[in-house]
Amino acid sequence: MIWESFPDYAALSTRAATIFLSAIREDPNITLGLPTGQTPLGMYERVVAECSRAYHCFQRVVTFNLDEYAGVSCEHPGSYCTFMKHVLFDHVDIAPEHAHIPNGAAPDLDAECARYEQAIEDAGGLTLTFLGLGSNGHIAFNEPGTPWSARTRVVELTESTRAANAALFAGGEVPRQAITMGIATILESRRIVLLASGERKRAAIARLRGGERSHDFPASALHAHPDVTVLVA
C-alpha cells in the first residue's frame, strides 16, 4: 500500500485527476470503477476540464459505478445516476452504453446484482477503481461486518449513512437499501486508488494506516491487494 499525503483537498484532487487521466492515456480501452460522494468531486471537475479542453478521451472508456440506491430510478435527483451525469458523463464523450450504474429501479434487485456482476466480468474486470473512505471504514456501501468474499448485492443502509445523504432526498426519505459492488469484486480490480479527506476521516485513515485487518473495518481488506494507492489530505 502506497501512501501519498497532500496539504489540502485541492492538491489531493489534482493528484487523483492526474492518475485518472494518465491511466486513460496509457489505455484508451480502460475499464474504471467509479465512486460518488463529496470526496471525488474535485477529481471529476479536473478530469472534465482537461478532457473538454485538451482532447476527447472517453470514446472507448468503460465505467462501472460502485453503487446505487434501491427503489430509485435514474431520473431521481438523489440517484447516483443523476450525480454521475451531472459531474462527469454529461461533460465528456463517453458512450452511454459504456457508463454502467446498477439499476436501482429494477423489478428484481437480486437479478440486477447478478447482471451487474456478469457485466463487469464480460468487460474483462476492472482495470482501475477509485474509492472513497467512510468514517467507519466502509468502502462503497460495504459496511462494517461485510465478508470480504461479498459480491455485488443488495444491502441495508446504516442510519448514519442515510443521515449523511438526507439532503439529496425531499423530506429526508432516504432509501433504506442500496445495490453495492462487493469487497471481492473491488479487490479483483487490477489497481485501486483510495481518496480520503477531511477531519471526519482522520480516525479511519489512522486505523487503515495502522495495518489492522478486520471485518469490522471494511477498508482493511485493501491490505490484501497488491496495488493500492491511498491519497490523503
Image (cartoon, rainbow, N blue to C red):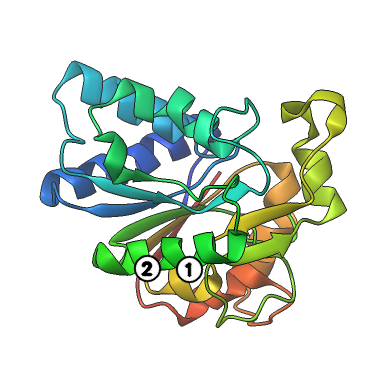
Depth check, front residue: 122 or 29: 122
Asked whether 98 or 185 is in front, the reply is 98
The furthest residue to the top = 53
Q: Amino acid at mark 2?
A: Gln
Residue at 56%, 43% (x, y): give it: 233
Give, as a three-letter code, the residue at label 1. Answer: Ala
Please report the residue visible at 23 percent of the width from the left and 26 percent of the height from the top: 51
Tell me residue 224's x, y (percent). 47, 82
* Image point (64%, 59%), residue name: 205
Q: Residues within 10 Å of mark 2 (few under 14, many from 20)?
A: some
Left or right position of 1 against 38? left
Task: Answer whether residue 203 is visible to the viewer in this image.
Answer: yes
Q: Is residue 76 left or right of residue 222?
A: right
What is the number of the mark on residue 118? Answer: 2
Q: Residue 228's quadrant in the figure?
A: bottom left
- Position of the N terminus, as image quadrant, is bottom left
> Which residue is at the front of the view, 190 or 79?
79
Q: Which mark is drawn over residue 114?
A: 1
Q: Residues within 10 Å of mark 1 (few under 14, many from 20)?
A: few
Q: Is residue 30 above or below residue 2?
A: above
Q: What distance separates the C-alpha of mark 2 from that of mark 1? A: 6 Å
Whether residue 1 is visible: no
CB under 8 Å between callouts 2 and 1?
yes
Which residue occupies 65% across, 63% down?
154
Placement of 210 over or under 134, stated as above or below: below
Residue 69, position in %: x, y?
65, 46
Q: What secondary structure is marked by label 2? A: helix
